[in-house]
Image (cartoon, rainbow, N blue to C red):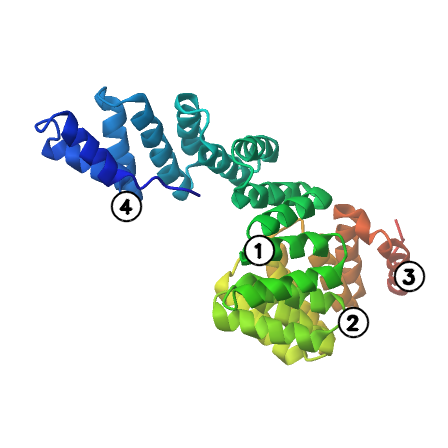
Amino acid sequence: MWFYPSFRTLVTSLALISPGIASAQQYQDWTWCYEPDSTRDQTIAGCTALILSGRESKDHLALEFYNRAYAHHAMGNYDYAIADYDQATRLNPKDAPTYNNRGNAYSKKGDYEHAIADYDQAIGLNPEAPSPYNNRGNAYYRKGDYGRAVADYSQAIGLNPKDASPYNNRGLAYHAKGDLDRAIADYDQAIRLDPKFVYPYKNRGRAHQEKGDYEHAITDYDRAVQLDPEYLMAYEGRGEAYHGQGDYDRAIADFEQVIGLDPKYVMAYNNRALAYYAKGNFDHAIVDYDQSIKLDPKNATAFNGRGSAYEAKGDHERAIADYDQAIWLSSEYSYRSRHRKLLCGLTGKVAG
């Protein structure tokens, strides 16, 4: 996003209008509204005071609505931000950064249609700025339109080939299209441009993992957690790669790390349960599936997995009950119906 650090220029122009007009309070309001070093609350307070003063020119009001929107945006108050960006575009309809940033606010709300419309407007006003292309690519990506996402990321790269972010993003789009080799090539380039950019390591690790190359995947996940020791998704990916190698103890250790970072992350319990199951530790697997189901009672995967663990322990009645629940929650587990009938035969129950 862009911020307008125009404080010194504006204060100078204010003083030229009248030496006595810039009171201490007004000076503070201008400082808070226009200085990038102000806190978000100060920006909002200063800009609000100026907007309500009735003394501001149209051009200054546009900047003040913009800067207040920027502060609301940074605080996650996207509806307030959009309302202020609306005012800024009304006062200055030719300002590309305002449309770009309003598009970002809409994207944060998941309103990708409005976001794309704003990025279109920003690009129309300034076709040489790479940021709106990258942002529009993100919106297309989240809509599942990976072809258009790739086209926009490529445009952003053409305008600024030294920016690592569009390469990482284009890699994600190729990845989603199933083109893992192109994805890896883009992650490689992102890392060359910015060796401390953590996301391409995790993303490249995932691509290597999907190709069955667990060694390279683990190397990338290692680097990701070195750069960010609290990067949950990197521990999760590395745990899955260790599982793929059959190294269940290390997989369990990584899933424990994930749970430590986010005790409510359901998939971590599912994944650790799978590793325990693979080790033959069915009781521990059941405990993890219990927790997963407690966190998400509609988690068909956990019911199915717990059913498998009960079956492995010879507790066929509990296995049937869990398979029934998995089948009821998701058609994905309809294949269990035949298996369930076999278990019913073993228990003497009538297969309903």
> Gap between marks 1 and 3, in whole Å?
60 Å
> Gap between marks 2 and 4, in whole Å?
58 Å
When asked about the image quadrant of residue 107, the answer is top right
Residues under numbered marks 4 and 3 in contact, where contact means CB atoms less than 8 Å apart: no
Residues under numbered marks 2 and 1 in contact, where contact means CB atoms less than 8 Å apart: no
When asked about the image quadrant of residue 317, the answer is bottom right
The percent coordinates of residue 308 (x first, y second) are 77, 65
Vertical order, 151 against 340 (above or below): above
- Hey, what amino acid is under mark 3? Leu
> Gap between marks 3 and 2, in whole Å?
14 Å
**Mark seen at residue 342:** 3
- Hey, what amino acid is under mark 4? Thr
When asked about the image quadrant of residue 115, the answer is top right
Residue annotated with mark 2: 312
Q: Secondary structure at mark 2?
A: helix
Give the mark count. Answer: 4
The percent coordinates of residue 192 (x first, y second) are 57, 67
Question: Is 12 on the left or on the right of 153, as rendered?
Answer: left
Q: Residue at x 80, y 64 (%)?
A: 316
Mark with earlier residue (4, 1): 4
Q: Given this view, does label 4 or label 1 mark the residue nearer the observer?
A: 1
